[in-house]
Image (tube, coloured by chain):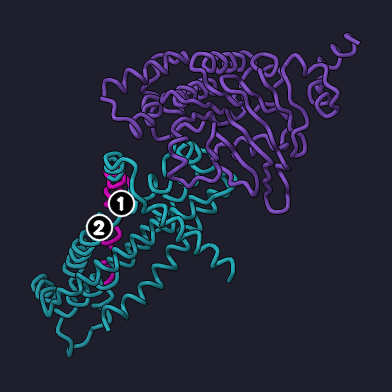
Chain colours: A cyan, B purple
């Protein structure tokens, strides 16, 4: 318990350092643009592939579980849409990004720590925590909602293709289903979750990397811890946010 | 002038600096020597503020540095340059961008002025036509020289070097030593070098501080070091076979 509180205290102190006034905003802006490409744009491919197959599987599973004449077939489209918007595009994408982006952040910052690059920044009088972490947080907060929207679109397209090509639903029924009883607030809910998850992934992974002590072995461990802790926190916050936003 | 007074630093229960007091001479090359694990690097990193000390005072001229907060320390840190043991160049930046980094961060120079300054610093350390290379593409000696170029880009008042010639061949090590000495004289910097290389001591040392088992055992010049009464220092200075033979022949 004491160890947890110590770590939590260090995390809060790191965030305080991260959110202090930037030395030179123009440099931070350039860094943020770089991170948008590195952490955001480079994740488009993996999110698109995963979302496509996720949508396809949800459609097929829903179809096989609703093989009953009482249920209209357009419910398959509705089920696919709601599952993707409410849960899969925000939470599953966040877990994937925790693996891809989180481990990358922890190992990048961790390597900078063990090779004294962070010390070099400090010696120059640069707030290393802010310079290294703030652009990453801003970039993911800006780009992850775009990734979630992309995931929703590609997921639904994946569901439509899988449903129509396998013959479990007609194209008309699927399109009717994804338009039926649409609640726009679900998108807001998904976006709010995405913002929380983006902050968790970046800040927790940065924290793990920033306080690495030792060598390459410890950098590897920090990278693993970053993925594990981010994932657990994402799942925990998923429950809390769902209770707060949908109840 | 940099002064350290009654400094204490420990890691868990291991006391690494025990009541260390020393004054480093301004405008000269000051050397901290000692065996591996004796506390040299901890002393150097404590002076520059990378380690928080438990007790004691670190003075830069008339400013009590270790009592300042991060923002207040910034002004003094802009006057510091540091060469790390592993060079600590930023992996993701080219040689040019590495040297330009402090200029981008802390000056309002125009792009042309920055390029001019970068080329001047790189020429000064004999790095030619390597502006677009990344640190991974450089040799150990080149990395050290680029790190020196970055350290002097803002015309620092103080230069700190942590084992500048570790991992280098003897000839490159001498070149790096000479470069540090020349730059110290050229810019009238107060330079503090951590080393356990006796070649460096005899080549560039003006004031030498010997640290052993967390305490300062001896202070003096390179002329005095060969005639010291300090047994630990003599063991250190005459540790290798050649030095032992030389000593016995002198006796």
Q: Is residue A218 left or right of residue B32?
A: left
The residue sitting at 65% across, 44% down in the picture is B56
**Picture quadrant of residue B192:** top right
Residue A10: give x, y in percent of width and height: 50, 59
Secondary structure under the numbered disc 1 in the rendered image: helix
Q: Is residue B109 left or right of residue A182?
A: right
Q: Nearer the viewer, residue B20 or A10?
A: B20
Q: Was residue B47 drawn as part of the magenta stretch in this picture?
A: no
Residue A220: give x, y in percent of width and height: 53, 50
**Picture quadrant of residue B113:** top left
**Picture quadrant of residue B24:** top right
Secondary structure under the numbered disc 2 in the rendered image: helix
Q: Which residues are magenta?
A: A33-60
Q: Residue furthest front?
A: B62
- B244 lies above or below A84: above
Q: Was residue A49 drawn as part of the magenta stretch in this picture?
A: yes
Q: Is residue B55 left or right of residue A23?
A: right
Q: Point out which mark residue A43 bears.
A: 1
Q: Quadrant of the C terminus of chain B?
A: top right
Q: Point out which mark residue A147 bears.
A: 2
Q: Earlier in the sequence, mark 1 or mark 2?
A: 1
């Amino acid at each position: 318990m004491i160890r947890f509180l110590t770590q939590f205290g260090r995390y809060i102190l790191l965030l305080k350092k991260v959110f202090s006034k930037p030395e030179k905003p123009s440099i931070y802006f350039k860094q943020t643009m770089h991170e948008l490409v590195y952490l955001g744009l480079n994740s488009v491919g993996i999110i698109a592939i995963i979302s496509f197959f996720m949508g396809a599987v949800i459609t097929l599973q829903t179809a096989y579980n609703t093989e009953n004449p009482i249920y209209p077939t357009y419910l398959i489209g509705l089920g696919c849409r709601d599952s993707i918007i409410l849960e899969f595009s925000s939470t599953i994408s966040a877990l994937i990004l925790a693996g891809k982006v989180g481990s990358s952040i922890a190992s990048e910052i961790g390597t900078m720590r063990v090779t004294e690059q962070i010390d070099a920044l400090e010696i120059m009088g640069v707030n290393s925590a802010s310079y290294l972490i703030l652009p990453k947080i801003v970039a993911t907060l800006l780009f992850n909602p775009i990734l979630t929207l992309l995931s929703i679109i590609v997921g639904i397209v994946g569901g439509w293709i899988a449903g129509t090509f396998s013959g479990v639903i007609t194209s008309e029924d699927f399109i009717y289903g994804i338009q039926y009883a649409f609640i726009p607030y679900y998108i807001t809910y998904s976006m709010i979750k995405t913002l929380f998850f983006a902050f968790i992934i970046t800040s927790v992974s940065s924290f793990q990397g920033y306080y690495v002590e030792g060598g390459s072995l410890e950098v590897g461990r920090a990278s693993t811890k970053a993925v594990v802790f981010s994932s657990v926190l994402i799942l925990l916050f998923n429950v809390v946010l769902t209770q707060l936003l949908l109840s | 002038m940099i002064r350290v007074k009654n400094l204490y630093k420990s890691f868990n229960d291991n006391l690494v600096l025990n009541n260390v007091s020393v004054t480093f001479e301004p405008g000269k090359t000051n050397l901290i020597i000692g065996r591996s694990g004796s506390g040299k690097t901890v002393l150097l990193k404590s002076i520059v503020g990378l380690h928080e000390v438990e007790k004691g005072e670190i003075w830069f001229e008339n400013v009590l540095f270790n009592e300042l907060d991060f923002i207040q320390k910034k002004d003094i840190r802009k006057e510091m340059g540091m060469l790390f043991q592993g060079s600590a160049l930023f992996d993701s930046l080219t040689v040019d961008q590495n040297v330009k980094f402090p200029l981008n961060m802390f000056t309002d120079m125009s792009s042309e002025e920055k390029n001019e300054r970068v080329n001047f610093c790189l020429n000064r350390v004999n790095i030619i036509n390597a502006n677009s290379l990344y640190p991974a593409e450089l040799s150990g000696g080149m990395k050290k020289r680029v790190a020196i170029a970055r350290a002097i880009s803002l015309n620092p008042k103080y230069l700190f070097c942590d084992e500048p010639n570790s991992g280098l061949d003897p000839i490159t090590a001498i070149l790096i030593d000479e470069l540090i000495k020349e730059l110290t004289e050229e810019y009238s910097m107060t330079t503090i070098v951590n080393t356990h290389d006796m070649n460096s001591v005899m080549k560039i040392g003006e004031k030498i501080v010997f640290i052993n088992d967390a305490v300062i055992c001896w202070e003096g010049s390179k002329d005095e070091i060969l005639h010291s009464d300090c047994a630990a220092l003599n063991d250190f200075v005459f540790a290798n076979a050649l030095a032992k033979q030389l000593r016995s022949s002198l006796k």
